Image: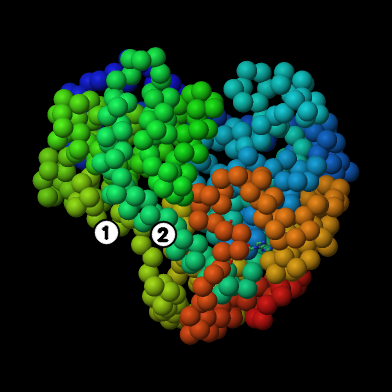
Amino acid sequence: MILTEKESSMDAASTYDKIDSFKKYLSGDSTDGTEDLEDPFEDVDTVKVAQKALPAIDPADYPTHSQMVLEKRRRTVIVAGSQKCGTSALAAYLSSHPSIRFSKMKEVHHFDQNSNFKRGLKKYDAQWPLEPEDPDFEAQVEELGDLEEPTLRYGVRAEATPYYIASKDACSRIAKTFDREEDDYRLVVMIREPTDRAWSEYQMEMRRILDENAMKEALEKYAVEVFECYMQFKIPVFAQGLSLEEKTLEAYNECVPEEFMSLARFKKFEKVMSRQMKKGRASMNLRNAVKSQVKYNLVEKVQNCWEAKDPSEADAFMSFVDKISRSETYAVDADAFSAEEIQRLQKTKIKRGVIFKLSCLGPTFFEKLNSPQVAFSTDMQSYRTCKQAQATLDETSLTEVTQLVKACYKTPAKGITKQFLYRSMYAAQLQRCIDSGISPSKIFLIDSEDFKSSPSGILKELHEFIGVEDFEYEFNTPEDVHAEINNRFPTFELTTGWRFDGSTEEMPEKIRKDTTLFMRPFNLLLKEMMANGGMKGQKKYSFEP
Ligand SMILES: Nc1ncnc2c1ncn2[C@@H]1O[C@H](COP(=O)(O)OS(=O)(=O)O)[C@@H](OP(=O)(O)O)[C@H]1O
């Protein structure tokens, strides 16, 4: 979606109108039109492609990608978990296999995130764009007609979103979307010693918080400098032939100090920005990226300095913020609101990108991470208390444990965050996935340690399960695997807090001991499930129960 010059022209008054309409929105009398935001995918029928009737042929007879393409069949291979168990390494392998098409992004988050799922299968399919070298390219383009981005429709395709297995919705959505012969799926789930996995996640969260703090500090430090530089560009004046995006990017490149640019959080912003630039068009992503800057208060800082120097320019700046973020973001001065209104605003958790003064931000604004003692012990304690209240449920039965976990671990409706123990309870998650319609025979299990030490045997079996020919990969060392991950998914390590070998600090001994004990019943159930549950892949894990 391109913002026209007309749209991006200065109109300071409208900013303040918006404050009024925002107040109305808060009081339930919204006239701001926010709900009418254009969603390019809203009318796409989620299962239209999948439902296309095709002759029944046993997929096992058509194992390779190109054969599947010719037979107009598709198989989606989903590495569905678990987080911190080596899913990126596996993704690097699969994406190098000649008969597997891997998604553009490592983690697609289509089935766990409501906002993505709502956009339909067309949006998901766009992760596998059609290339001229694809078999039957011409025929497929013709068939696809005037689609903006023709996508690979047949063959074996794969993605890796480790959140899926922990999500309450992903498995049932996958089953409903793909469970048919000509458009089927396979799930791959990796497991790792549960305490190690939980600690690895904790450490990644810690890195993320550090990244955020670094961003925050840099904003504090450089706000004035950035502002001075912006002044030269006079961002709100868009009459010099450059589009809003070009101007913004140019200003960022010119104004933002090196030290700032190397920050992970900033890299994320930059990544979205340059992708949009390459495409030559702005989009929801661009607006979201800008909103993330808004969140970090840069806009407000700049605005304050601006105001001090030249109030008329400050109005223009407000207008810029307003325009770039359309009706989703309201540039407001917190002083314009009463204390009660501010309280209500804080409850919206900046869903609408309101720009607050720093002093008005609630404690949940910036992510927090409890100490390991608190994070792990509180979690264990609250589970135990909850378990006592469910006295009829027994931890030695898989069905009952699944119910216990369901009752005692509330998966947030939106995303799953910092549930270190929950995500190591593999048995309960697998069972829930099976209960929601995924046949165990479609799930392939991999033990992370075994995979790390000797991948080739596991990969051979996996290839067969996926229905592609066996293949000898050229990665022989962990360094090679690491390089391949960065080669295939170049911004992943830079922007997400993920590291190839991230566990640097030791887990405090007492917490390790308690956690390992806590995990035992779940591990015993997993052991039973692996041996007799009908799932494919490894039949036992490498760690102590
Ligand atoms: N080949 C191979 N096999 C198994 N495991 C491996 C492999 N290579 C890396 N690793 C370890 O995987 C951990 C990161 O896992 P993920 O890539 O799944 O993390 S994430 O869910 O995408 O965040 C990460 O764990 P930590 O070191 O604890 O961070 C890596 O050490």
Q: Which of the numbered marks, if any, corresponds to residue 141? A: none
The three-letter code of the residue at mark 1 reads: Pro
In the rendered image of this protein, does residue 77 appear above or below residue 521? above
Query: 306 or 320: nearer the eye?
Result: 306
Task: Give how far across and how far down residue 477 sits, in percent.
Answer: 75, 60
Task: Give how far across and how far down residue 429 sits, in percent.
Answer: 58, 64
Residue drawn 50% across the image and 49% down it: 495
Q: Determine the secondary structure under disc 1.
A: loop
Pointer 1 residue: 363
Quadrant hosting residue 131: top right
Residue drawn 81% across the image and 52% down it: 473
Pointer 2 residue: 210
Ligand 1 under 8 Å from disc 2 Cβ: no
Quadrant containing ligand 1 reads: bottom right
In the rendered image of this protein, does residue 178 appear above or below residue 34? below
Callouts 1 and 2 close, C-beta under 8 Å: no
In the rendered image of this protein, does residue 66 appear above or below residue 404? above
Task: Give how far across and how far down residue 357 sits, in percent.
Answer: 20, 46
> Where, quadrant-wise, is the C terminus in this rendering?
bottom right
